[in-house]
Amino acid sequence: MKLASRMSRLGTETAFEVLAKAKALEAQGKHMVHLEIGEPDFDTPKNICDAAITALNNGETHYNPSAGILPLKAAIAEDIAKRRGIEVRPEEVVVTPGAKPIMFFVILALAEKGDEVIYPNPGFPIYESVINWVGAKAVPIPLKEEFEFSFDIEDLKKLVNDKTKLIIVNSPHNPTGGVLTKEDLEQIAELAIKHDCYVLTDEVYCNIIYEGEHNSISTIPGMRERTIILDGFSKTYAMTGWRAGYGVMPPQFADQIARLQTNSNSCVNTFVQHACIEAIKGPQDGVTKMVAEFKRRRDVIVDGLNEIPGFKCLRPHGAFYVFPNIGELPIGSRELEQYLLDEAGVAALSGTSFGQYGDGYVRFSYANSVENIKLALDRIREAVAKL
């Protein structure tokens, strides 16, 4: 089959490739500890599931508007307004099947050949993949360990220019768990306003934060009209398989994003949207308990990794990932990924899965039990001692 040349520019998400390798080893009888996939290991809260069942029984199984049903859009607008302290109207909301389509649609709608898009590196690999796919220039901004995986504003100043169409920020951050400060965001906003470019702020982990508070660039004066907020239900409410996310953006741009949805997947399942209303408006104690448990796991894995010779691990302030420095080990990131899989029965991801500046690091997801995290740490310690 002769594919269009643009398909050669489309990347992937390595977590699913490593998951497949780990599952294949399990099928051969090898016990694996899964620290590769970015998915809460908690069940979706019962009240959310019950809302979906009720919606199904009430016949909520038909098409709905491409941008989403009004009750959900209104609930999202109210929730965003309350959490961020900004005014949001339902017509600024587009509901999508997961949060990834917002990345895809926004980059597709804004960037083309000759444009530049700045994205965090190491960072979620789909950013770079889609930028390349649409023919724009992907411009990485390195996130540095010495800045707790934020960036040097002087580096960003050198990258932003009149060709910059979009700046992507992600806080809390995948893969490092880093959190941007209000001061960081103010400096990004100043550059975006000066160069008249947009900002896509990926805030899908905004409710999984352990110290301090979440800050959104959308709250900074002059940024509402040039900011697209990306958020969703997968991480906060353990709803990864439900495929429900959303974007919040200027209404005239929301119309264009909804049009892209019409041309691709029509709309999000109606009964799933009713479950999302319950997620937002229902009890939040499940979220509180989950975040407390993630914090406990974070401390276990950070302390454990820092006791293993060759690992140096910062304590992340959000999300559910650690990104330890392995520069003192005698093998590189990609080799360590395979070595831990084969030798230790631990599935992790090479830092290079998240871009060139991830070299010398690995990512572990601590969306697994403390018991399994401790088992993984024991296996890692024993395996690297053989190197």
Image: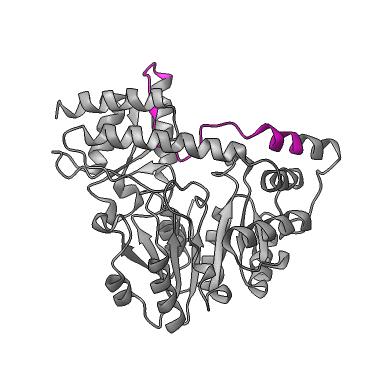
- The colour scheme is one colour
> Is 50 in the magenta?
yes
For the C terminus, give its image quadrant: top left
Question: Can residue 114 be seen from the camera position used here?
Answer: no
Q: Residue 50's image quarter? A: top right
The x, y position of residue 332, in whole percent, is 20, 42
Question: Can residue 374 be seen from the camera position used here?
Answer: yes
256 on left or right of 228: right
Looking at the rendered structure, the number of numbered marks drawn on it comes to 0
The x, y position of residue 241, in whole percent, is 60, 39
Instruction: Please tell me whether residue 154 is drawn above or below residue 125 in the rendered image.
Output: below
234 on left or right of 129: right
Q: Residue furthest right?
A: 58
Q: Residue at x 52, y 75 (%)?
A: 223
Q: Residue at x 36, y 18 (%)?
A: 30
Instruction: Please tell me whether residue 63 is drawn above or below residue 168 in the rendered image.
Output: above
The x, y position of residue 286, in whole percent, is 60, 36
Foreground pick, 251 / 338: 251
The x, y position of residue 79, in whole percent, is 65, 56
Foreground pick, 33 / 352: 33
Q: Residue at x 31, y 63 (%)?
A: 151
Q: Residue furthest top?
A: 29
100 on left or right of 30: right
Q: Which residues are magenta?
A: 27-52
Instruction: Please tell me whether residue 206 is drawn above or below residue 135 in the rendered image.
Output: above
Foreground pick, 361 / 288: 288
Secondary structure mainly formed by the magenta segment: loop
